[in-house]
Amino acid sequence: MPIPDDGYPRAAAVSPRLQVASRTASTNADLVSAVSEGAAQEWPHLSVLLTTDQTAGRGRLDRSWTTPPGTALAVSVLVRVPGIPLAARGWIPLLAGAAMTRAIDARMRGTGHTARLKWPNDVLVDGLKICGILAEVTTDPDAIVVGAGVNTTMTRSDLPVTTATSFTTLGVEPDDDAMLADYLRALDEQLAALAAAHGDAAAAGVHGEVEALCSTVGREVIVALPDGSELAGVAEMIDKDGRLVVAGRAVSAGDVVHVR
């Protein structure tokens, strides 16, 4: 899907700055660089940099994320979180995943498809990945860049793996502007709630919301841990720090496979 002629008016009504790049290597890298180079005041909270032609995107664990031009939306959002204690900022990627899950699910209403969150922050539709999220710190300790890549008009042959999907392959017409506006509103609301609760995710209500949206909880899973080992068992819950508890062990990072 090319950049629409009228831009993204709904999203622009939510964001104080929405900038569209016709083509770039990585919206996350560009936004992190802009903040690090002293242009922080030019990018207020909830600023957006997006493109439909990203040539060197990155996912978690430094994986590459590339798509044919015009078939996916790469969007990076700068969030300023001085009111959220450092110890609670691990929730930010999860909140972004929950916000995007809600935004995508809104586009699926009436289609027979359902969007769910896969811990920590992938969005699945009918069990297949449609969106991934990567949060990165900047030189400003209170500014975090949250990047998301959404498969919009990718055909089945465009999809990089059989476990991925897109709006087009699902037979759903994408509406990037409406989806992005919903995502920004939900993300901002959840961050504000977490800040108001001084980082207590349960008191903020975001812990319960993330867990309710998460299809990983209650499933048999295999987690590939950063040290190369694997952990298998039932994903019992998400704990107060946002970690996934599998077979009694809390996991803060790792690749999760849902065992069918």
Image (spheres, rainbow, N blue to C red):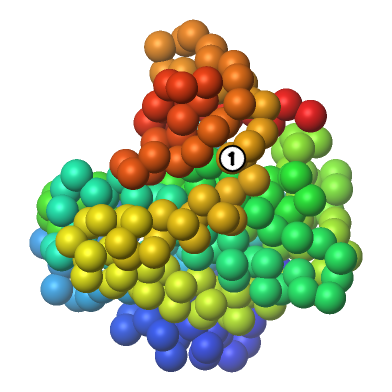
Relative to 193, is 136 above or below?
above
Q: Quadrant of the C terminus?
A: top right
Three-letter amino acid code at disc 1? Answer: Val
Quadrant of res 236: top right
Residue 51 horizontal/vertical position (percent)? 52, 65
Q: Could you tell me which residue is drawn at 18 percent across and 61 percent down?
A: 198
Q: Could you tell me which residue is drawn at 47 percent across and 10 percent down?
A: 228
**The one of 143 and 185 positioned closer to us in this rendering:** 185
Q: Could you tell me which residue is drawn at 51 percent across and 80 percent down?
A: 181
Q: Quadrant of the N terminus?
A: bottom right
**The one of 240 and 179 positioned closer to us in this rendering:** 240
Q: Which residue is mark 1?
A: 217
Left or right, 56 with reference to 92: right
Relative to 134, is 30 above or below?
below
Residue 132: in sight, yes or no? Answer: no
Residue 48 horizontal/vertical position (percent)? 39, 71
Q: Could you tell me which residue is drawn at 60 percent across and 20 percent down?
A: 233
**The one of 171 and 93 positioned closer to us in this rendering:** 93
Quadrant of res 14: bottom left
Residue 12 horizontal/vertical position (percent)? 44, 86
Single out the residue that lies furthest toward the top.
Answer: 229
| Helix, strand or loop for disc 1 | loop
Residue 258: in sight, yes or no? Answer: yes
Crowding near pointer 1: few (<14 within 10 Å), some, many (20+)? many
Left or right, 215 with reference to 87: right
**The one of 8 and 97 positioned closer to us in this rendering:** 97
Relative to 12, is 252 above or below?
above
Residue 114 horizontal/vertical position (percent)? 75, 60
Left or right, 64 with reference to 104: left
Number of numbered discs: 1
